[in-house]
Amino acid sequence: MLWGLRKALGTAIETETSQPAWGGTKSRRAVRAAVLGATGYVGRELLTLLARHPFARVTHLMSSGRDRKTPFPIERAHPSLRGRFSAPCVPLGLEGLVPSEVDLAFLATPHETAHEVVPVLLDRGLRVVDLSAAFRLRDAGAYPRWYGFEHRAAAALAEAVYGLPELHADAIRKARLVANPGCYATSIVLALAPLLGAGWADVPAGIIADSKSGASGAGRAPSEKLHFTEVNENLRAYALFNHRHVPEMLQALELGEKAFTFTPHLLPITRGILSTIYVRLAEPRTLGQVVALFRDFYASAPLVRVYGVGSLPEIQAVAQTPYVDLGFALDEANRRLILVSALDNLGKGAAGQAVQNLNLMFGFPQEAALL
Ligand SMILES: NC(=O)c1ccc[n+]([C@@H]2O[C@H](COP(=O)([O-])OP(=O)(O)OC[C@H]3O[C@@H](n4cnc5c(N)ncnc54)[C@H](OP(=O)(O)O)[C@@H]3O)[C@@H](O)[C@H]2O)c1
């Protein structure tokens, strides 16, 4: 069961020693990137990061075209991007998305849109980072239960690489299609992977992940539950036992459904996720040993910060950053470990991670445009 994670542990260490393929040359042509879903929250974050990327430039910006049927400047959707892009944002259309114009397409659209569009782009020879969940689950049969649609893109699904750079860097480098992980999943998988990989968790005793997210995690489309007065000064649990990120986390951690309980909550803030994860250790350990395990596992991961004894991650430390922060408390006598994981859902939980994946795919330093 833990083979994949043990292998990942090897990969995490390997990434530090491998030479960046980009070689620091400025003469190399910039990666030409298309952003589909440019008017959404993830789209804005992607554009913000790509605007400052030293080795990438945005060639195409697309929205659904539902409300804006003709090309428009992106600052109409995102005032913070005023003056940053000369290309207008246009309704989704695949005509210009060809290898002579684009190297990589980011999909920051609904899952169903990505499911339709990604196979076409792959057939044309483009590389893709899909930020939706359309290619995260290996089992096509899981999509009707968790996402409400039949998956019909078997070939693309089969070649998709789960885009967690800290665990799958080698596969991401070679991938044509990277399935960028979900925001909750990133916060929880990165917190549990070292522990499960080392065989330190008492898995049959059960693992409980309790997460709180800011409201931007639900996207920009308005709904009654996301109305200001419903979210403000409130804290609400939702999707108990059936959140869509559950199968993704079980798959990534090689866990069975009955061993893992996940409860998300909606916090009255804009950005950020804090996950508190409860695990019983299989053998007695000290807190120092736990910290050392994580520091070793993530020694070469520039976007993971492992806290020492006496401090814990919090949302203010990661909001507007590309980091995931990990910290720990341990009741040594009773082998009860609490892991605390914090990230920005639009940063390491979405666009930051997508740019990190671009960097790996094209041989740039992982943290280019991010740090
Ligand atoms: N928000 C997060 O924290 C987060 C984290 C990780 C992953 N994700 C995933 O990233 C994707 C984007 O999320 P988001 O939060 O940015 O959503 P969002 O704010 O609702 O933005 C959605 C974007 O997709 C476009 N779109 C909607 N329907 C479309 C269609 N039928 N064809 C083409 N484009 C369409 C929208 O264009 P219009 O403006 O024209 O409607 C908009 O640009 C989703 O799959 C989400 O699950 C989100």
Image (cartoon, rainbow, N blue to C red):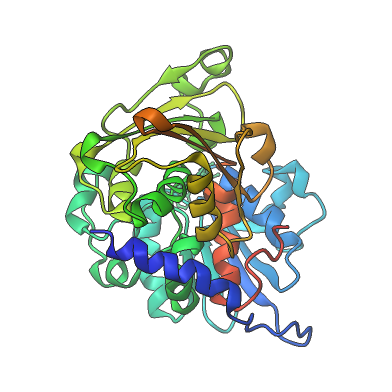
Task: Decide if residue 63 is in sight here.
Answer: no
Residue 53 x %, y %:
73, 65
Q: Is residue 304 above or below residue 24?
A: above
Residue at 53% from the left image edge and 62% from the top image edge: 106
Residues 335 and 85: in front is 335
For residue 100, which quarter of the picture?
A: bottom right
Residues 192 and 319: in front is 192
Residue at 21% from the left image edge and 58% from the top image edge: 139
Residue 134 x %, y %:
35, 55
Q: Is residue 87 above or below residue 220?
A: below
Residue at 60% from the left image edge and 54% from the top image edge: 352
Q: Quadrant of the C terminus?
A: bottom right
Task: Decide if residue 33 is in sight here.
Answer: yes
Q: In which quarter of the image is the N terminus?
A: bottom left
Residue 263 x %, y %:
36, 28
Residue 355 lies left or right of residue 148; in this view the side is right
Residue 185 lies left or right of residue 354; in this view the side is left
For residue 302, which quarter of the picture?
A: bottom right
Residue at 44% from the left image edge and 53% from the top image edge: 181
Residues 186 and 307: in front is 307
Q: How many labels does the image show?
A: 0
Q: Is residue 226 above or below residue 277?
A: above
For residue 344, which quarter of the picture?
A: top right
